[in-house]
Image (spheres, rainbow, N blue to C red):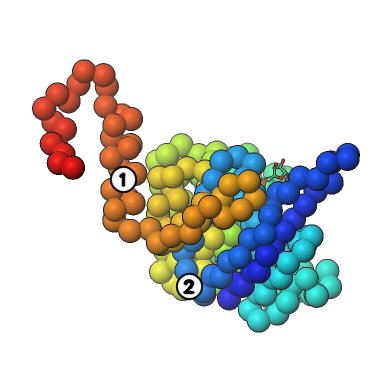
Amino acid sequence: MIRVHQLSRHYRMGSSIVRALDGVDLAIRGGEFVSITGASGSGKSTLMHLLGCLDRPTSGLYEFNGRLVHKLSDRQLAAIRNRTIGFVFQTFNLINRTSALDNVTVPLIYGRKGNTRAAAMEALRRVGLAERARHKPSELSGGERQRVAIARAIVNNPQIIFADEPTGNLDSRTGRQILEIFHTLHAAGVTIILVTHEMDVAVQAQRLIRMKDGKILEDRVVDDALRGEMEAADERFRLPQGAGVGSTPARSG
Ligand code: ADP
Ligand code: MG
């Protein structure tokens, strides 16, 4: 589905050049659930914008569904985004003055499809928010706003969803509910690319890509060993000082 070769995105800042993305090679098959992680400024969002056809590379090759993205016109890119890609952002990016239902309808209007209300209601139902259809974003909680944004992302039945720090503005319990929705979409066959700097979120995926300084540092399968490491680190973090004496399992080697 996605094939990238030596993909780079450089920004000119005065007399210097920022290598936001610096020669990335990557292939992602349809149906994968991939997380992209790394410190702030490592190039996660830049990569997501390129893969999502929101931006063009400075150099390198990008093939999406067999089409060379850098050769397509703005109109062709917009059509690909509208038909096959859904986006979810940290700050939800909803229109505040209109209802949840109208927000979810927006991509359908661009696509000039009939019966937009029924499709938008169905998308809201899929994220468990049908009863909030008439509410404006200001009348919804953070988690509910993100669910509206996910409904908007899936209303055109995209093949792939790009989510950039989708749980970044949510408490951990609400974040888990949002991740449940991604798992459900993944189980239904949607490819998920999840950008996050939180390791406990990243290990929810099947595959984890770690970035540093615009390059891929590590690209690995998420297995029980990695999830176990994460949980162990988490527990050590939570354990109050002096507590839990004798409860730590003895380790050999
Ligand atoms: P991340 O999402 O991992 O935090 P980004 O992809 O947003 O990282 O940014 C990677 C690097 O590129 C950072 O050093 C950032 O400052 C720089 N950068 C991103 N967008 C721009 C831009 N529009 N102009 C100049 N520099 C940018
Ligand atoms: Mg970012």
Q: Residue at x 80, y 75 (%)?
A: 71
Q: Residue at x 72, y 59 (%)?
A: 8
Q: Is residue 231 visible?
A: yes
In the displayed structure, 245 sits above or below 91; it is: above
Instruction: Name the residue nearer the viewer: 185 or 252.
Output: 252
How crowded is the residue under tag 1: few (<14 C-alpha within 10 Å), some, or many (20+)?
Answer: few
* Three-letter amino acid code at the position of disc 2: Gly
Q: Position of residue 86 (x, y in %)?
A: 62, 63
Q: Residue at x 48, y 72 (%)?
A: 31
Q: Residue at x 63, y 46 (%)?
A: 213
Which residue in the structure is indicated by mark 1? 229
Which residue in the structure is indicated by mark 2? 31
Task: Give left or right: position of 242 versus 22.
Answer: left
Q: Who comes first in sequence, dot 2 or dot 1?
A: 2
Distance from label 2 to label 1 (Cα)?
26 Å
Kindly indicate the quadrant of the structure image that contains residue 48.
bottom right
Kindly indicate the quadrant of the structure image that contains residue 64.
bottom right
